[in-house]
Image (tube, helix red, strand yellow):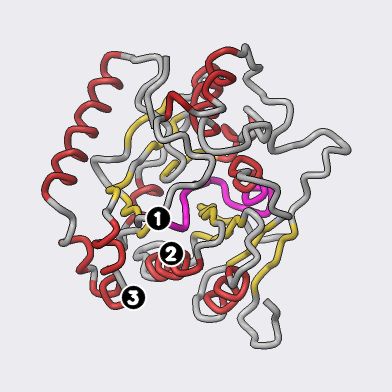
Amino acid sequence: MSRTFDLSVILSTYQRPEHLRRSLASLSLQRGVGGRFELIVADDGSVDETRDVVHSFARKVDFPVKLTTHPHEGFRLALCRNDGVRASRGAYLLFTDADCIFPPDHLQKHLAYRRQGVVRAGNSYRLERELSEKIDHAAIVSGAYRTWVPWELRRQMVRRWTTDLYYELTGHPTKPKLNGCDCGIWRTDFENVNGFDETFEGWGCEDDDLGLRLRRAGVRIRSILRHTRVYHLWHPLDPTHPGLWKNGDNVSRLLGEARPVRCIKGLFPRQGDGNQADADSCQKTKEQPAKLPAA
């Protein structure tokens, strides 16, 4: 029988191996979760050294690491994340991205604040280019990067947390916003809505859509910003990024369609859809080859 875990971390990536290395380094330093989690790196079809980075990392850590990938046919983050879940065995899922750095108690906090019928929604300090390039392996190991965040970003995060708390207390119908860079959810709740809608292609709205359907299914979304936040490394915008969320190609579809709570093309695809990922279980032996809120 396959082993199960308390937590599966689904880390999505595409063509950013240096960001991925730093993100993985921060995951290797997580405290208080030994033996409780697995990592699935969900790749969107990278053709660079991403696979080698993941396999090299897997040989150095004491928790299971898998890599899922598929041919790159444009920005398909929803498919990417569903692929990761299909390869996972955790009762609780944490979605995030490989351009994020995690404080050493991040996974522990998500496990501690799990609640039945609740999604824990996080967010990130969005770091500027100069600061992002300054964060190297030594800064991650020492934790120095956490002291480098400008006070204005810290104030913004406090305001965001207090605003989220206000939304929770007043029962706002669409906020707090579910953000795919830091989202903790029970597998059963994710499966009940059939995961991310894979018909969302190009940048944006796949997480907004998931949040809407989860709320319609009776799941509450609650902020975790009081307890933990991630650190987002700067990178150029994807070519499909509209600049402003409201100008995105997916927005009119998100707002204009009456979609079922359980999406049609999602975690459990219809027979013949062909959304099967190439999944590697990385071994530690050298022989292994390796009206909604704006975003």
Using the image as rendered, state which of residue 64 and residue 83 is in the foreground.
Answer: 83
Instruction: Give the SS element for disc 1.
Output: loop
Point out the image quarter for the C terminus. Answer: top left
Magenta part of the chain: 83-99
> Which amino acid type is shown beneath numbered disc 3?
His
CA–CA distance between discs 3 and 2? 11 Å
Query: Is 216 drawn above or below residue 164 in the view shown?
Result: above
Q: Position of residue 206 (x, y in %)?
A: 55, 33
Looking at the rendered structure, which numbered label has been put on residue 281? none
Q: Earlier in the sequence, mark 3 or mark 1?
A: 3
Q: Position of residue 154 (x, y in %)?
A: 16, 46
Callout in the foreground (3, 1): 1
> Which amino acid type is shown beneath numbered disc 1?
His
Q: Is residue 287 left or right of residue 226?
A: right
Q: Is residue 91 left or right of residue 20?
A: right
Q: Position of residue 15 (x, y in %)?
A: 55, 61
> Which amino acid type is shown beneath numbered disc 2?
His
* Residue behind mark 1: 235
Looking at the rendered structure, which numbered label has been put on residue 19? 2
**Disc 2 + disc 1, Cβ < 8 Å:** yes
* Residue behind mark 3: 137
Q: Earlier in the sequence, mark 3 or mark 2?
A: 2
Using the image as rendered, state which of residue 160 and residue 47 is in the foreground.
Answer: 47
